[in-house]
Amino acid sequence: MESSLQKKNLLKPKRKSIMKQKWLYFMMLLPLASLIIWNYIPMYGVIISFKDYSPAFGIMGSPWVGLDHFERFFNAFYFWDVIINTLRISLYSLLVGIPLPIILALMFNELRNKKFKGIVQTISYIPNFISIVIIVGMITFFTSPVDGVINSVIEYFGGTPIDFVGSADLFPHVFVWSGIWQSIGWGTLIYTAAMSGIPQDQYEAAYLEGATRMQCIRHITIPAIMPTIVICAILATGSVMSVGFEKVLLMQNDANLATSEVLSTYMYKSGILNAEYSFSAAVGLFNNLINFIVLYIVNKFAQKFSETSLW
């Protein structure tokens, strides 16, 4: 009896808190329902990775094949080439894409002219709102070996035109740096917002003690935004095997296929175009499992060496 009364007494404050915030919980119902309907219910379809799926028989009626699709993928001629290409572009993007927005945000934070700072920030993140199709069109316009702007300048100074997109060696550089140009402003905006919460009296006290700007950045700004840096780095690393499908596919051609064929395009060509849905699902499941494992390892690493992590 006493234990039941204690439980009731413990539940009363919780019920009062829920009733007090009932409209907030009500507002959560729609996004929660959307999340369940579009992200969790379709997950049952992952079982076609272990079946010989046919639309005529449906998901449950298709015969089981076990790990046949995974074995086929692992034994494929292009398996290691696809994995290496994916990792090359992903790691390249991470090594460049993580520090550059931080550096740019630190530079913006040091600007004292608010009007000039606002204009430069706006210019930096406008490319984030440009569609991938237009970005690829701009890349073609600037790098075309026939009438591209960059090659026109090279020819003007007596050089030989370079097929930037058509070169297998140059493709990763063009892909990564065009992506940095498009996304760096948005990343900078996140870090700038984090810096806006730093109390100004810390800087004033540091200046009174004779600290330089670089010392303030090192000992005040960077430690203050370190949790944001860690979270952004974990999220970026968690998609290490997921290279942007649309952009790669639009930039891909026979000349650069040796370095541009990544997991997402291989899955699209081998699975979707050939209507091999089970094989495509198996490749996608493998991709997601690797991403989850990497995300888990990086999060554990962040837990061990910092006070910030996703969970």
Image (cartoon, rainbow, N blue to C red):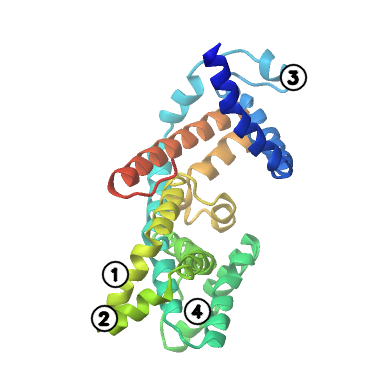
Disc on the earlier residue, 1 or 2: 2
Q: Residues within 10 Å of mark 3 (few under 14, many from 20)?
A: few
Q: Determine which quarter of the picture holds residue 38.
A: top right
Q: CA distance from mark 3 to mark 2?
A: 73 Å
Q: CA distance from mark 1 to mark 2?
A: 10 Å
The circle on residue 56 is 3
Q: CA distance from mark 4 to mark 2?
A: 44 Å
The picture places residue 214, in percent across and down from the top left corner, at 29, 78
Secondary structure under badge 2? Answer: loop
The circle on residue 101 is none
Dividing the image into 4 quarters, which one contains the N terminus? top right
| Dot 1 amino acid type | His
Please say if the residues under marks 3 and 1 sit with CB atoms less than 8 Å apart: no
Disc on the earlier residue, 3 or 2: 3
| Dot 2 amino acid type | Ala
In the displayed structure image, the side of residue 205 where residue 3 appears, left or right? right
Which residue does the image show at 56% across and 27% down from the upper left? 10
Q: State the residue position of label 2.
A: 211
Please say if the residues under marks 1 and 2 sit with CB atoms less than 8 Å apart: yes
| Dot 3 amino acid type | Ala
Secondary structure under badge 3? Answer: loop
The circle on residue 219 is 1
